[in-house]
Image (cartoon, rainbow, N blue to C red):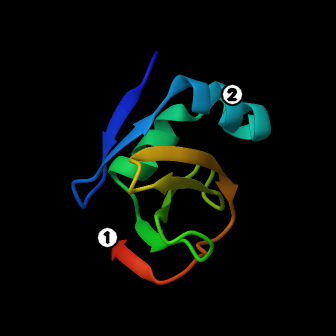
Amino acid sequence: MGETTLTDPMSRRLVLADRTWFGHIVKGHPEVAMHRVLVENAVTRPDEIRFSRSDRDCRLYFGPGPRPSVRILVVANVVEGVVKTAHLCSRVSGGECEWSR
């Protein structure tokens, strides 16, 4: 697969590298292994983007998950332009809303 460059609704380009996908995301969150498309869609077509409370350079991207009560959360460093992690969650959390549908 290599690197996938994703563009969010604010025209920021974020790279999802295979080393991040396989070496961190799937390794640490195996429940998302079959949902790379949902992870990518959470960045390119999110329901909401929130500021991270722990890192001012990071944003939290929320998108639909594999089931109605589950969401995909993608954490990306928008300054470095990289996806850091992704996992399933049950609700939207984080800091202030930066963008919403």
| Residue 41 position within the rendered picture, expressed as x and y whole percent measured from the top left | 41, 45
Query: Which callout, 2 or 1, points at the residue further toward the start of the chain?
Result: 2
The C terminus, quarter of image: bottom left
**Which element type, helix, strand or loop, lies under badge 1?**
loop
| Left or right of 93 in this view: 29 | right
Label annotation for residue 101: 1
Decide which of 39, 18 is in the foreground and name it: 18
How many numbered callouts? 2
Q: Residue furthest front?
A: 80
Q: Nearer the viewer, mark 2 or mark 1?
A: 2
Classify 47 as above or below 98. Answer: above
Question: What type is the residue that disc 1 sits on?
Answer: Arg
The residue wearing badge 2 is: 23
Q: Residue furthest top?
A: 1
Question: What type is the residue that disc 2 sits on?
Answer: Gly
Res 66 visible: no
- What whole-number distance in Å separates the C-alpha atoms at marks 2 and 1? 31 Å
Res 38 visible: yes
Label annotation for residue 54: none
**Which element type, helix, strand or loop, lies under badge 2?**
helix
| Residue 69 position within the rendered picture, expressed as x and y whole percent measured from the top left | 65, 62
Classify 40 as above or below 55. Answer: above
- Looking at the image, which residue is at 50% across and 42% down? 38
- Looking at the image, which residue is at 58% across and 72% down? 92
- Looking at the image, which residue is at 42% across and 24% down? 3
